[in-house]
Amino acid sequence: MTNSPIIAAARPDAEWWRTAVIYQIYPRSFADSNGDGIGDLAGVTQKLDSLANLGIDAIWFSPFFESPQKDAGYDISDYRKIDPIFGTNEDLDVLLAKAKSLGIRIIVDIVPNHTSDQHAWFKAAMAAPEGSAERTYYHFLDGKGENGELPPNNWQSIFGGPAWTRTTNPDGAPGQWYLHLFDATQPDLNWDNPAVAEEFDEILRFWLRKGVAGFRVDVAHGMVKRAGLPDATNYDHNMRELPISNLGREEAEKAVPYWGQPGVHDAIRRFRRVLDEFDDRAFCAEASMSPLPRLAMWVRPDEYHQAFNFDYMTCDYEPAALKKIISDSIIEYAKVGASSTWVLSNHDGIRHATRLGIAKENTPRPGDGIHPSDPAPDEALGLLRARAATAFMLGLPGSSYLYQGEELGLPEAWQLDVKYRQDPTIARTNGERIGRDSCRVPLPWVAGETASNGFNTTGESWLPQPENYRTFSRNLQEGVPGSTLELYKRLLKERKAFSMGSGEFRWAEHFEDKNTLAYVNNGVLVIFNFGPDAVALPAGEVLVTTQHDLTAENELQHDQVVWIKL
Ligand code: NOJ
Ligand code: CA
């Protein structure tokens, strides 16, 4: 019926991670069992049945390790211990056992680029003199200028301000500086020190022995820095990082001496060798690299299994751009034997139900939230588009990542008052950047049950839910035809039934025009109408639509997706 070339061949024997739908749990906001307002592992265990019911294959947990929580757990002080706010190591054993019984794999988040400043290594380094072995676990350098009063180089923290903080010596005199690409409480590790790699081998083994299915690797592109830590050259006049996707590889490595350095691949291969001591485990890299051929270097056969597709997540809502990224992703990853991944939301960006309702010119750069004073997003349009974008994504071959709450159509809590917000970015930019808290607000489970809509029994909530979260509560959607939750369930069910995660994929170009995209995956035709006009549909059994019904004329309305069995 269509002569478009096959872009992905069917792969019936695919390993689990090539096709998995992986649900991200942000533990402090999922479910709170003891009522202190912070989600915990026992809360997750209580709710696991509802995730099995949704039809996911695996869960990725954002970090739950011991941490001062200066960056919501991405500042780890003990990599082998669950933070008491989330429970105990035994709570995780219980959770793992229950997940196993439900056929759900558990992936944990490993943070190898930096530790907390409360990690034993960093405390020892601070207590030790300049030039000591203890300081070689991190990047401690003398400052520039006559009295060392200037940072060692011009690198900027991703959260704003310089990436260096000066220490104070025991006698009160100013001392050396240490590097932190994120908050000052997150010192970067020195991966040239073999003791660092050895310790991480053991940390990986520790969790693998417990039965985790793999790791999401935080800042996987940043672990190894360019020798000599030279100045970066990719800042604008406000010292903001500029994209480097237009540069050749070597140019990019020079321009940003802390991202994507060749040495990082040795560290990755070492990680991989450890993981391969165990059966059937996988890595997913958070490597913010662009363009896709560069990112594909992270998923070569002896490196990570897969990497997040941030180009896809941040793609404009526009057919030609989306089509190019999908084709490029499938093709570039396949060249190195990897599968593609897809993602629309996570804990660092604006929830896609809101993001897709923001005019392009008002969309903040990735990683930034919208201010309460910004123009209000069109939330109805955002939700319509989000449902369509998700349905389009879940039919693609490869693995998809979902972010907790998106199955409820949850919007961004963008009105959240700054007084509640905790993202270190806010303080580091004097409020210019509002940070990421508004995608991290606790989930509503039971409408009106408590002030937190059943997040717990006390109504406490580390970030307050906005008024409209009540209407998105899970109990109002469970079993309700047309709800976003039922839409997700249906999509996941049909995706499995037709093995679309490992299917034969091609574009269905004769259903496309400038406002539509269409593909066929294992005999299912998926059409996306970006609007504005309705589109006539071919014959076939309608498996799912993202709005209640098609029109009587069998037409697909604007911002709608349909799956048709051919
Ligand atoms: C990426 C994580 O997703 C983000 O939440 C965190 O702030 C940074 N890495 C630093 O660990
Ligand atoms: Ca709790």
Image (tube, grey):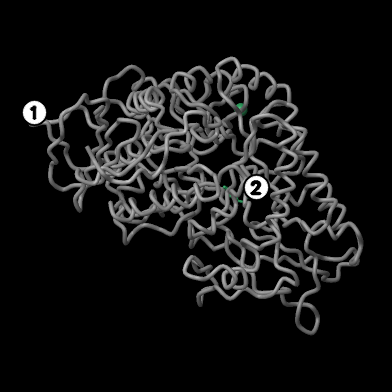
Mark 1: secondary structure: loop
Which quadrant holds the C terminus? top left
Disc marking residue 382? none
Task: Specify the quarter for ligand 2.
Answer: top right
In the picture provided, is 254 more to the left or to the right than 548? Answer: right
| Extreme-top residue of the structure | 101
The local crowd at label 1, few if under 14, some if 14 to 19, many if 20 or more residues have their Cα within 10 Å, is few
Residue at x 19%, y 27% (from the top left corner): 540
Q: In this view, does 391 lie above or below 220?
A: above
The residue nearer to you, when weighing 429 against 295, is 295
User: Residue at 46% of width from left, 49% of height from top?
Assistant: 349
Mark closer to the chain start, 1 or 2: 2
**106 on left or right of 8:** right
Q: Where is residue 257 in the image (x, y as percent from the top left)?
A: 65, 68
Pick the front one: 365 or 55: 55
Q: Is mark 2 within 8 Å of ligand 1?
A: no
Q: Which residue lies furthest to the left in this view?
A: 553
Query: In what quadrant of the picture does the N terminus appear?
Result: top left
Mark closer to the observer (1, 2): 2
Going by the numbered disc 1, the residue's amino acid type is Ala
Q: Please state the horizontal and vertical placement of residue 388, each as a whole percent of the image.
A: 29, 38
Give amino acid for label 2. Answer: Glu
Q: Residue 303 carries which label?
A: 2
